[in-house]
Image (cartoon, rainbow, N blue to C red):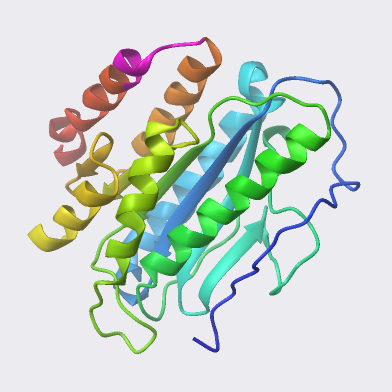
Amino acid sequence: MSDERHPETLPASYEDIEFDNNAQRLPLVLCLDTSSSMAGVPMEMLNKALQDWTRELHDDVSLSYSVEVAVVTFGGQGVTVWRGAQPLPPQASVSPFVPAYAFQAPVLTAAGVTLLTEALELALRIVAARKTELRTSGLQYYRPQICLVTDGLPTDGTGHLTNAWQRLVPVLTNDQAARRYRLYAIGVGNISDMGAQVLEALAPEFNARLHGFPFRELLQMMSNSINAERRGAGEEIQAKIFADFRTQRSAWDA
């Protein structure tokens, strides 16, 4: 689509990011639905959760110097990649990843359609680009994490439902079997049965259909998962963290 922000490469120019040590990195991408159905209270809750989580990242010594955060949104401006609070232009020559201690959350608005497929493809590209850069710099990294959050079904640029997401399933299956990253696919609000089935197909091990918009709890779960990854926890521990998160619905409903 003409308005999609789709950098094909996100290059090896990170000179403006100051790292205070050689801590092993963990790239994290938040891939967030900002389509029109998220307008109003859902978007207010998401922005508030991002602000609160940002402060927690800054205060958490164990995360602040190892986690790197990038944000991808899909909504009114097509697919947009953010470097902290700033959207990057197409073909940007700067990394979207910001160390957690310096990360500032963007203020998001809701509009437009649900270009989930294109957003997830972009998330995969920026993770691959960052891993290449870290290897080139002689730095080690933990298994990256991608957290996809949506309340609807994937659409094309005109807002019509699309099955284009199916082309991602074999890629995601192979990549996760090779432990290239861990994908969480989270449905919120009034996501339909069909929408939940899409997320299950994309992330068979780590998908959830949540009542309401528990963004704060979701981001806290991501922090717990990252800390477990840093401690060398196996898949059974990660599965337990996620299962515990999924069973908190009664608290959210209250």
Q: Does 236 lie within the magenta span?
A: yes
Please report the residue visible at 53 percent of the width from the left and 61 percent of the height from the top. Answer: 122
Q: Position of residue 204 (x, y in %)?
A: 23, 40
Q: Which residue occupies the extreme right position in the image?
A: 15
Q: Is residue 231 left or right of residue 131?
A: left
- Is residue 22 shown above or below 34? above
Q: Give the residue at the far left of this rendering.
A: 193
**Residue at the spot 30% in from the left edge and 85% down from the top edge:** 159
Q: How many marks?
A: 0
Residue at image x 71%, y 58%? 10
Left or right position of 40 against 204: right
Residue 204 located within the stretch drawn in magenta: no
Residue 216 in sight from this viewpoint: no
Image quarter for residue 56? top right
How far across and how far down the image is residue 150, in percent?
31, 58
Residue at 49% across / 49% down in the picture?
Answer: 30
**How far from the left and from the top, in percent, is residue 158?**
34, 89
- Residue 77 position (above or below residue 195): below
Which span is picked out in magenta? 232-238
- Is 206 displayed left or right of 83 in the figure? left
Using the image as rendered, state which of residue 47 and residue 69 is in the foreground: 69
Q: Is residue 183 above or below residue 4?
A: above
Q: Nearer the viewer, residue 22 or 87?
A: 22
Q: Position of residue 154 (x, y in %)?
A: 29, 70
Seen in the picture, residue 57 relative to 85 is either above or below; the reply is above
Q: Quadrant of the C terminus?
A: top left
